[in-house]
Image (cartoon, rainbow, N blue to C red):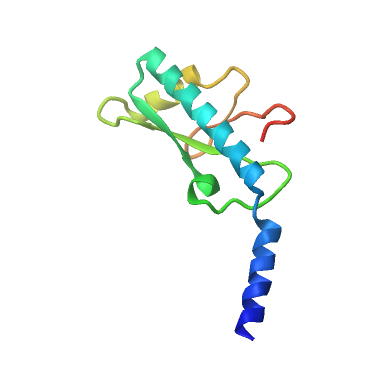
């Protein structure tokens, strides 16, 4: 009985788990974006670091038609106050980024067709 339950669980995981090719594409795209953000931060002399969060970082991504990447930028609190950070982010995100105001500002960028 236990073996049958384990097989059912394994089968269900395979249904929702992205393929190794999808995970590889997501990893490559994530590294490209992080690298680009780090270069922009460096070029502008902004003391911050970018990193991946969300389901990609936690390795809990579920298979779907389109994926989103949660990328965060951590600023040096000793150097910047909260009111400056949104403006600084606006200097490093691509021109096609859409700003959404909330408890903190978010920037969304739609990928080109064929991108993850």
- Give percent across and percent down for residue 75: 35, 30
Query: Left or right: where does residue 73 sit relative to residue 60?
Result: left
Q: Quadrant of the C terminus?
A: top right
Quadrant assignment, res 114? top right
Q: Identify whether 31 is placed above or below 46.
A: below
Residue depicted at x 45% and y 18%: 40
Question: Which residue in the rendered view is the most extreme toward the bottom?
Answer: 1
Residue depicted at x 68% and y 73%: 8
Q: Identify whether 41 is placed above or below 75.
A: above
- Give percent across and percent down for residue 72: 46, 35
Q: Identify whether 12 is placed above or below 96.
A: below
Query: Left or right: where does residue 75 sit relative to residue 87?
Result: left
Query: Left or right: where does residue 46 sit relative to residue 13?
Result: left
Residue depicted at x 68% and y 51%: 63
- Give percent across and percent down for residue 102: 52, 38
Q: Quadrant of the N terminus?
A: bottom right
Quadrant assignment, res 66? top right
- Total marks drawn? 0
- Give percent across and percent down for residue 10: 64, 67
Which of the pair 67/105 is nearer the observer?
67
């Amino acid at each position: 009985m236990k073996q049958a339950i384990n097989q059912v669980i394994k089968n269900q995981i395979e249904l929702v788990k992205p393929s190794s090719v999808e995970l590889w594409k997501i990893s490559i795209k994530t590294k490209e974006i992080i690298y680009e953000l780090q270069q922009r931060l460096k070029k502008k002399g902004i003391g911050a670091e970018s990193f991946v969060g969300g389901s990609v970082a936690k390795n809990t991504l579920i298979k779907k038609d389109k994926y989103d990447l949660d990328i965060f930028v951590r600023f040096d609190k000793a150097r910047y106050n909260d009111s400056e950070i949104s403006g600084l982010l606006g200097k490093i995100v691509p021109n096609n980024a859409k700003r959404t105001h909330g408890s903190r500002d978010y920037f969304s960028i739609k990928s080109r067709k064929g991108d993850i």
